[in-house]
Amino acid sequence: MKRSPIVAVGTVVGLASVLSFHTSPVKITLNPSPGTTTAPPSTTTTRPAKKHAPATTTTVRPGATTTTVAGQPRTTTTTAPSTTTTARATTTTTVAPTTTTVAPTTTTTAAPATGVRTVTGPLVNYYYGELSVKVTADGSKITSVTIGTLTDGGNPRSQQIDQYAIPLLEPEALAAQSYKIQSVSGASYTSAGFELSMQYALKKLGL
Amino acid sequence: MTRAVTSTRHHIEVMGTVVTVDLFDSRDEDAAAEAITRVQELLRDVDRTFSTYKEASPLSRLRRGEVSLGECPPEVAEVLDLCQRAKELTAGWFDPWALPGGVDPTGYVKGWAAQRALDELRGLDVSGAIVNAAGDVASFGGPTDAEPFHSGIVHPDDAQRLVAVVELRACLATSGEAQRGAHLYNPFTGDFASAVASASVTGEDLGVCDALATALSVGGHDVMVLIDRLDGYAAMTLDAAGVMRATADFPLVRD
């Protein structure tokens, strides 16, 4: 079978969902009928966003998240439920017990701030070791999310593992696809927490 | 001349879940109705034989040692044989014999049953059909004679979001730490734990896809390598850190 080399190390699912790091799984309440909705995931991209790429508006639950980084507990204080950013917003995500609502598109003409910047978040625990996330934003729009560092703590498998890593789809590409989906696959009721350093990076970026 | 795509959906409550059967561009309604009835009977028969929740099912009696394999309906031996092959295919990561309480082929039966249900529909005058057994999908054809089906894969944490769209060439099974909580058993450690948040496998046979997805969910990278080497099957995983991985031939739809 053919096999492609590493394409790019990952991105982040649910850009907004990763804003809190849970040391234990979060119990999720879910829609009992998968297959009826096909809202776009707030996925991130390693490609430049397209012209009409949605930005992500994030609401962080108060009192969330203790983050363990490299074995040491770190408390991350999160903001009260408030909107942290807007800009041509199409997606609104509420973090933790993970209910996601996708708002209809609104066209906002608010001018994005301060050009292109890149920030790397702190290392966080990851299944095979530690990783950090590098986020680039243009104005208030995130244009790329990549893995900045990936260490395996001596685990020899991580190099092999990453030959399979691929960038996720841009959310608008998925949204465009959804109208022609005839079926949905997925066990879908998992309670795995997202363990990334996105929160720091986004905060640094003012997003 | 283009026609609008027509489809009909049938819901069958069976095996503790709902199986949907979709027929696309069906041109003989009587034959379709008869086939749906056969599918219902087939699935209910599978449930009666293989349910581990029904005390009197042949499988339950086999697990308690009350009957021998030879005294069970022949489907039981057939499925256990397929399970043994799946166990070998996955280097032991899929292992219905490792669970406490006796052999439990449930992880294979749902996909196998949906595949057999689909086979009942093959003779129909349709452009395509989909059998979706609680997220495990078997199909042939497409929404029209000229197009393939597309299937979404739902986000493991949020059924309202998709993580990917794939071209549905035949079957697609997704496994994760699913509906029933941490039900995935690691035959090597004895733990109930998953290596990845979500594991999807496509291929020709849904029973095999189902077993491979279960193994991939528990075994992670080791099983990804096995599937990569397996002709006709492709895999994708999403781990807890949000990193997506896929074999090169996984039929992701990108734009």
Image: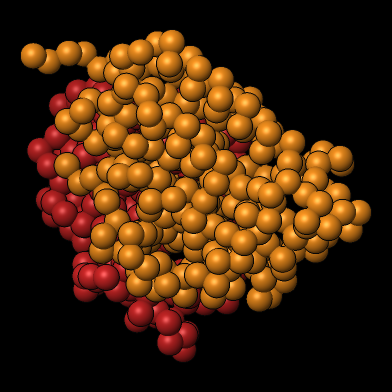
Q: Does the image show residue A16?
A: no
Q: From the viewer's perspective, is B125 left or right of A4?
A: right
How far across and down, in percent of the image, does residue B247 sit? 31, 64
The colour applied to the residues of chain A in this rendering is red
Residue sitting nearer the eye, B111 or B35: B35
**Is residue A7 something one can see in this rendering?**
yes
Q: Residue at x 47, y 54 (%)?
A: B209
In the rendered structure, the answer to whether residue A112 lies left or right of residue B7 reads left
Where's residue B113, x and y in %? 57, 41
Residue B111 coordinates in the image, percent (x, y): 54, 45
Q: Residue at x 33, y 65 (%)?
A: B231
Considering only vertical position in the picture, is B212 above or below B114? below
**Residue in view at x 38 percent, y 37 percent:** B139
Q: Which residue is depicted at the point 50% across and 27% down?
A: B20
B172 or A72: nearer the viewer? B172
On screen, residue B40 above or below B29: below
Q: Quadrant of residue B18?
A: top right
Quadrant of the rendering where the N terminus of chain A is positioned: bottom left
Chain with orange colouring = B
